[in-house]
Amino acid sequence: MADGNHNAVMQAIQDYRVIQNQIGITDKKVCRTLELFSHVCKNLKWCKEQDGEDCRFDTKAYKTLQEVGQLVVTKEQKILGDVPGIHIGQLFNYKTELAACGLHGYYVGGIDYLALKVAGGEKVVLVAVSIVTNFDNDDDDEMEDAAAVPAPTPGTLKYKLPQKLKKGILALSNNKEYGVHVRVIRDVRRDRDDGLGYSYAGLFLVQSFNKNAIGEYEFELRRTN
């Protein structure tokens, strides 16, 4: 990519961060949203147990917070970098909980990304903000490197192979090009008896990526915080 285009993208990233800071995302706001989400979830779960109603109470909790304006960001907004008040190793029960606090998009597949308008909107560049993956590591505090393969879209049984360099995969490859950090969330549901659970692993930089023998893109990530 020509230096001029590269500089334009870097300027767009910087401009986005300025706008993001103006939204006023604080650790207090994030913690308050998580407390409200947990409280509404517990109440809805109790009602479900009493009434025998079959419902996704976590989804209802998210929509309740959305209706009263208590989400950290809207569904259309994306947070670049750290989310205030969220620490490495912090556990979450539901993907909707990740969305409520702005850690990962609402019902987004493995890679959540934003579209940056460059050069007055004439060009759009995708960059990844977060990824949910199921790499194995027994100690988050000791983890430095992780091989991450983008997860399939929810509701599908497998990838459509070979994968193409587009959407989320293209966005994550652009993170390497522009040195943009991506949040990594571990899917730890299989490690828990209740089948719930996501763990925040921290901010990572994309070191390299390649396409393996069966057509999947694999990304090598290194944690920086």
Image: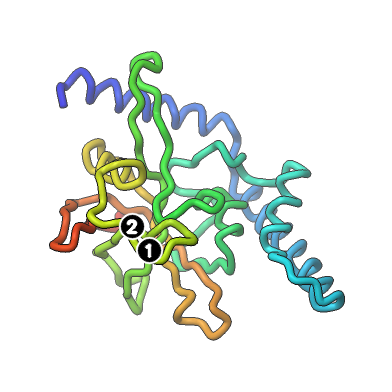
The residue shown at (56%, 29%) is 22
User: Between residues 194 and 22, which one lies in front from this camera angle?
Assistant: 194
Quadrant housing residue 57 = bottom right
Task: Mark 2: give few (<14), some (14-19) or many (20+) Cα within 10 Å.
Answer: many
Quadrant of the rendering where the C terminus is positioned: bottom left
Quadrant of the rendering where the N terminus is positioned: top left
Judging from the image, what secondary structure is the residue with disc 1 in? strand
Q: Name the residue carrying label 2.
A: 150
The residue shown at (26%, 52%) is 163
Labels in figure, total: 2
Please determine whether, in this image, residue 83 is positioned above or below residue 15.
Answer: below
Relative horizontal placement of residue 98, taking residue 129 as reference (left or right): right
Extreme residue in the right direction: 51
Q: CA distance from mark 2 to mark 1?
A: 7 Å
The label shown at residue 104 is none
Q: Does residue 218 appear anywhere in the picture?
A: no
The label shown at residue 133 is 1
Rendered location of residue 102, percent (x, y) = 55, 48
Relative horizontal placement of residue 219, taking residue 168 as reference (left or right): left
Q: Find out whether the residues at labels 2 and 1 contact each other: C-beta distance under 8 Å.
A: yes
The residue shown at (35%, 79%) is 138
Amino acid at the residue labelled 1: Thr
Task: Mark 1: give few (<14), some (14-19) or many (20+) Cα within 10 Å.
Answer: many
**Earlier residue among tags 2 and 1:** 1
The residue shown at (39%, 14%) is 120
Q: Does residue 115 appear anywhere in the picture?
A: yes
Amino acid at the residue labelled 2: Pro
Rendered location of residue 222, percent (x, y) = 25, 57
Rendered location of residue 77, percent (x, y) = 54, 37
Quadrant housing residue 131 = bottom left
